[in-house]
């Protein structure tokens, strides 16, 4: 592996730290590419509509949730999530259901219209991603998917664990 200014490890870094620095550089590159990709897929929608699609995606996959649980999954403030979901309820993309665990609370669920919106958006995303991986073999796609899944699990763990570094990256006290 060659290094350049983009993947140079911090001074005094060992092999593992260098590899983590390279991962960090590639994650940044992927985030920029994904941001541009999401903008292309969502062309014609404003920022608010793109943010609301994320809410629809999560609820379509997770099923009915309270606003607080949804905000936690999104990593957003409950008041922001509440505003977004209120707009989605007005647009008949979400509906409120009584929470069987606490009748004073409500759950948010995706309506049939909301599921249609999610399906159309996922279809556009699938078409764009198919072009991005068209030269991957089936085995490469399987490996890539497995590694992405492990990485996403690790990111989720890091987020919920307070993102404290552990192991070789931890500085000596």
Image: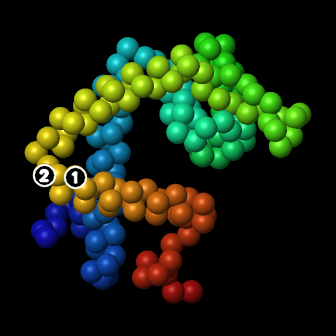
Q: Position of residue 23 (x, y in %)?
A: 31, 63
Say which of 58 and 103 sits in front.
103
Relative side of 135 to 46, left or right: left
Relative side of 43 to 98, left or right: left
Q: Report which residue position mark 1 lands on.
A: 141
Q: Position of residue 8 (x, y in %)?
A: 24, 67
Q: Kindly state the secondary structure of the residue where label 1 is placed.
A: helix
Q: Position of residue 119 (x, y in %)?
A: 42, 25
| Residue depicted at x 65% and y 46% | 72
Instruction: Please state, as top left, top right, bottom left or bottom right, where the N terminus lies in the image.
Output: bottom left
Q: Are marks 2 and 1 in contact (CB under 8 Å)?
A: yes
| Residue depicted at x 13% and y 52% | 137
Relative side of 152 to 43, left or right: right
- Label placed on residue 137: 2
Q: Is residue 68 visible?
A: yes
Say which of 9 and 22 sits in front.
22
| Residue depicted at x 87% and y 35% | 103
Q: Kindly state the secondary structure of the residue where label 2 is placed.
A: loop
Badge 2 local density, few (<14 within 10 Å), some, or many (20+)?
Answer: few
């Amino acid at each position: 592996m060659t290094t350049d200014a983009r993947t140079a490890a911090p001074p005094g870094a060992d092999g593992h730290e260098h590899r983590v620095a390279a991962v960090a550089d590639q994650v940044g590159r992927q985030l920029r590419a994904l941001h541009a990709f999401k903008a292309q897929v969502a062309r014609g929608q404003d920022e608010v509509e793109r943010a609301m699609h994320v809410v629809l995606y999560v609820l379509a996959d997770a099923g009915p949730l309270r606003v607080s649980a949804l905000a936690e999954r999104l990593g957003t403030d409950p008041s922001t999530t509440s505003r977004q979901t209120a707009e989605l309820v007005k647009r008949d993309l979400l509906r409120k259901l009584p929470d069987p665990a606490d009748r004073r609370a409500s759950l948010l669920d995706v309506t049939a219209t909301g599921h249609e919106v999610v399906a159309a958006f996922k279809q556009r995303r699938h078409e764009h991603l198919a072009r991005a991986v068209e030269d991957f073999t089936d085995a490469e796609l399987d490996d890539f998917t497995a590694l992405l899944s492990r990485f996403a699990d690790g990111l989720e763990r890091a987020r919920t664990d307070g993102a404290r570094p552990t192991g070789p990256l931890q500085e000596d006290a």
